[in-house]
Amino acid sequence: MSIPYIGRLAPSPTGLLHIGHAATFLAAYTRAREHNGTLLLRNEDLDPQRSRAEFVDAILEDLAWLGIDWQPPMLSQSERLPAYRAAFEQLLATGHIYPCTCSRKELARIALAPHEDIFANDLHPDSQSDDEPLYNGHCRPTASSPATTLLPSANYRFRVPDGETIRFLDRNLGPQTFTAGCHPDSARSPSANFFGDFLIWRRPLTGDASDIGLPSYQLACVIDDAHQQITEVVRGADLLKSTARQILLQRALGLPTVDYFHTNLLRDEHGVRLAKRHDALAIRTLRNSGLTAAEVLARIPYRIPTAT
């Protein structure tokens, strides 16, 4: 008996959706329909400084206008902090994570160049590169003495298995290979397919007793995919390396690995990946210009693949 197909849309309410989002969401919608499956909506609103209620409303409005239907109710990540914290505590108890007290300045120095925001894409990578600065293991404890005691004022990183190759078959882009490892000199000559210890939990930003910090995008995504019983994740190719990270998290937490379908990225006339700063290509802007939904979707310059 086959497992019913369940996919998801997972926008972050930090700006208006643009035509690049429409391309990815159309692919997710098409995949769900091809499999007679269900498409869910996840509101990835973990970034308290950038998430806005008006952007949630705009997301719902844009999806309806584009004709991309989804199955209610919508899940909001800001309401699921206890679930993420429980997973964090499980990883801590099993020695998979450790506290990192490196400052932004120190992390920028590790990366050998100033970074726009070292932690920006840990909450959601929507407008950032998937390739976070490669960590050199400065705070990493020895394997014989894992950190299992909570240090509230620190960020926490997942300890990747040094030298392990993570392989998965992408349903659109084919076989993918990434290598995990964290070595003192690795940050100086990183490979495009190499990744190190990555952030799992951000420390509290206030002195409020209720502020326990926030999970990274990687952790929240894995927990919610399992919670919603997602069978295939459809998202942009900029998140291929995140898939390797998330496979390690799934394994550490005893969660099932899902199928993945990464779409090609849309770029502007200068070859730059579309982001929410491209206001002229926002769905709302295009709609207000008088274009129909069909005309907007026709601007997507490639056919939605139908790989199995």
Image: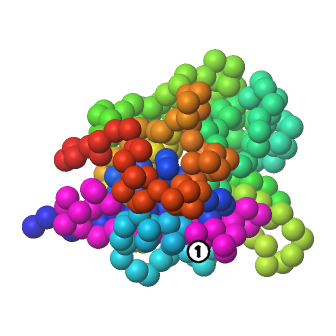
Amino acid type of the residue that numbered disc 1 sits on in the rendered structure: Asp
The image quadrant where one finds the N terminus is bottom left
Residue 39 sits in which quadrant?
Answer: bottom left
Relative to 99, 161 lies left or right: left
Q: Residue furthest front?
A: 290
Closer to the camera in the image, 233 or 39: 39
Residue 275 place in picture, x, y as percent: 61, 45
Q: Which residue is mark 1?
A: 57
Residue at (69%, 53%) from the top-left corner? 156
Residue at (51%, 72%) from the top-left corner? 60
Residue 164 in view of the camera: yes
Q: Residue furthest left?
A: 1
Q: Establish if 234 lies above or below 172.
A: below
Residue 282 place in picture, x, y as percent: 58, 54
Q: Residues within 10 Å of mark 1 (few under 14, many from 20)?
A: few
Residue numbers of the magenta segment: 29-58
Closer to the camera in the image, 275 or 198: 275
Residue 127 place in picture, x, y as percent: 63, 47
Residue at (57%, 48%) from the top-left corner? 281
Residue 283 in view of the camera: no
Residue 58 sits in which quadrant?
Answer: bottom right
Q: Does the magenta segment cover residue 206? A: no
Q: SS of the residue at dot 1?
A: helix
